[in-house]
Image (cartoon, coloured by chain):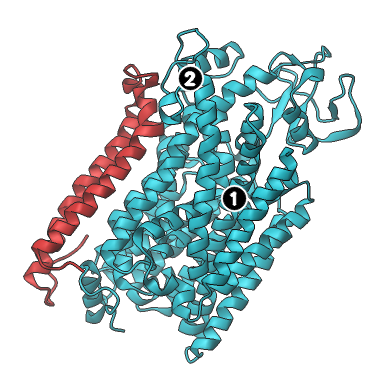
Amino acid sequence: MDTQTLIYIFVGLSFALYIGIAIWSRAGSTKEFYVAGGGVNPVVNGMATAADWMSAASFISMAGLIAFLGYDASVYLMGWTGGYVLLALLLAPYLRKFGQFTVPDFIGTRYYSKTARVVAVICLIFISFTYIAGQMRGVGIVFSRFLDVPIFWGVIIGMGIVFVYAVLGGMKGITYTQVAQYCVLIFAYMVPAFFLSFMITGNPIPQIGLGSQVNDGSGLYVLQKLNLVLSDLGFGQYTDGSKSMIDVFCITLALMVGTAGLPHVIVRFFTVPKASDARKSAGWALVFIALLYTTAPAVGAFARLNFIDTVNETSYSEAPGWFKNWERNDLIAFQDKNGDGVMQVRSGDAFEGAPEFAAEAGPSGERVVTNTPVADSENEVYVDRDIMVLANPEIGNLPGWVIALVAAGGLAAALSTAAGLLLVISSSVSHDLLKSTFKPNISEKGELLAARVAATAAIVVAGYLGIYPPGWVAQVVAFAFGLAAASLFPAIFMGIFSKRMNKEGAIAGMVTGLAFTFGYIFYFKLANPAANVAENWLFGVSPEGIGVVGMLLNFIVAIAVSKMTASPPVEIRKLVDSIRVPRGAGEAHAH
Amino acid sequence: MSDENETHETSAAEGAYWRDNIRLLVSLMAIWFACSFGAGILFRDFLDQFMLGGYPLGFWFAQQGSIYIFIALIVFYVVRMKKLERKYDLDD
């Protein structure tokens, strides 16, 4: 069977599985729709959280980032895992004990204020839409490359699948599909990693392989060889970074705190039966996530070695098939600057900007690139970092079924995250805006209908963003984490650990953190991108890491304002006392 | 930040449980900080002169070790909290 047929079979089977689960687990009440009835086993919830959390960015992009950034990419590895420690220790058990449906629920109740709730809803919707646009681009890439359908139809099919299980099943449907999606994606990620690690080092465990010797007889360790090869070609050392220490520090912290403040992750901990289960569940989630996250550095390093090995100093006419496949999809380009027909991989950009292809073919048969060449770099090869994981099995010459598996895995990662995000958007509209703020006497049935309508609307918007991705999508992912770190995390944290924090302080803090972080990222990423260099940054902190400063401002303003205003009412202090102890989860919160 | 001297009633067990919890949290967060921000970022250059197999040690902490330690921290917290909750008879 050829690879293309295998891809159709694998992707088709996985989609059929998701739909089957959706039909089996339809939601009948708002409690099932919002929190899967609150009875999910902590291990199952941990697995669902892992799929929810690991997005197209984790599955498709991260190893590519590591391959090209080396040490600097550690910010993602530590940042996106360390947040679970914050969740398990500081937030999850208390939020579960509080026991409502959404993040704005907690903020609105704890700060006895509809304004606080609405501010939280605004933060949540902004964070979630930013995030979901990226997922849809991931779906588009996988479809267009592997299934040979235009991105438009790819996104429509993806949206259709998500529609069925998110709108019908709500959180209940999403939870069990995410478990299936986790299995698909982790299997798809590990299999090629085992193969590659075994081929390059002789040890199939990638985490050990990366620390072992290359089995080419040179006696060099993988990282040593990579450093040697890269410095020969004019790149910096793989194990050294180019970012400043303060920036690495701030980005890591912003990603950690942002992770702990992401609404679609937090809400997963509302679905387990007990407060102590929330702690356990966060631990399981991190175990399932770590499996992929400790493998990614190995995949990145092996991919970089393999890529240079097969492409550098190879003449274009002998370029491997995968090179030409990705070139057809505009994600790889070769500009023969010295006219020798041989591809030179060196440091620096081959040409300015993303490739623009002319209609005719060049002398060696390559697609001619019309961009202005960068004169002071000998590099002739452009490669989009997002393709490394997807191209890896082909680069390593792995069998067709592995390639098909990776296609299904990439889709599972993108769809599971998209569904989780859609759910928090729809529940914040139907539950927080309608039921709790503007239309309190809506019936249970009406609320469930509103949740489904809101989910449908959110899917349509997300689909639109996926088909016509605004140029700023890639630029604003920093928004999601920075804003979550600067707005939601401090408000939730102080709501649990301080009885003195009142509504005035919390609202002032959230607004300050949000406005500052938004303004800083907006200025450097969108309004004046030319100024986005280290000399202009506040304390040398890039827009990716600025959420940390926003978070500190949030804490300072909130504490200062709360000291100058009245203490929260006594029933709120009792509420805080009750969420601090695990006994009696489920029937707590008397309000 | 938590002011326990507030006027209204919390039971003695709840107060003691919460103080023990905070103490545990502070020490675990210190380890969390030390392995990621300490070993993986601030003291990386110093640690990189040691090797763990083929990994420079600081690099290993940044891309592997801190993640394993994060898991260990959560596991330890889950176990200790369960014990604390039994001790004060506050478990769920």
* Residue A490 position within the rendered picture, expressed as x and y whole percent measured from the top left: 36, 59
Residue under label 1: A476
Residue depicted at x 27% and y 73%: A585
Type of amino acid at the residue the image marks with label 1: Val
Q: Nearer the viewer, mark 2 or mark 1?
A: 2
Query: Which label's residue is closer to the chain start, 2 or 1?
Result: 2
Chain designation of label 2? A
Same-chain check, marks 2 and 1: yes
Q: Position of residue A332 (x, y in %)?
A: 73, 31
**Letter of the red chain:** B
Q: Nearer the viewer, residue A335 or A375?
A: A335
Q: Which mark is residue A429?
A: none
Identity of the residue drawn at 37% across and 28% down? B60
Give the answer, above or below, for where B40 lies relative to A154: above
The count of marks equals 2
Does the rendering let one see residue A539?
no
Disc 1 crowd rating (10 Å Cα; few below 14, some 14-19, many 20+) is many
Q: Is residue A80 left or right of residue A64?
A: left
Could you tell whether B41 is left or right of A97 in the image? right
Q: Hey, what amino acid is under mark 2?
A: Thr
For residue A378, which quarter of the picture? top right
Quarter of the view holding residue A132: bottom right
Residue A257 picture location, percent across and down:
39, 51
> What is the display colour for chain A?
cyan
- The secondary structure type at the circle numbered 1 is helix
Identify residue for label 2: A201
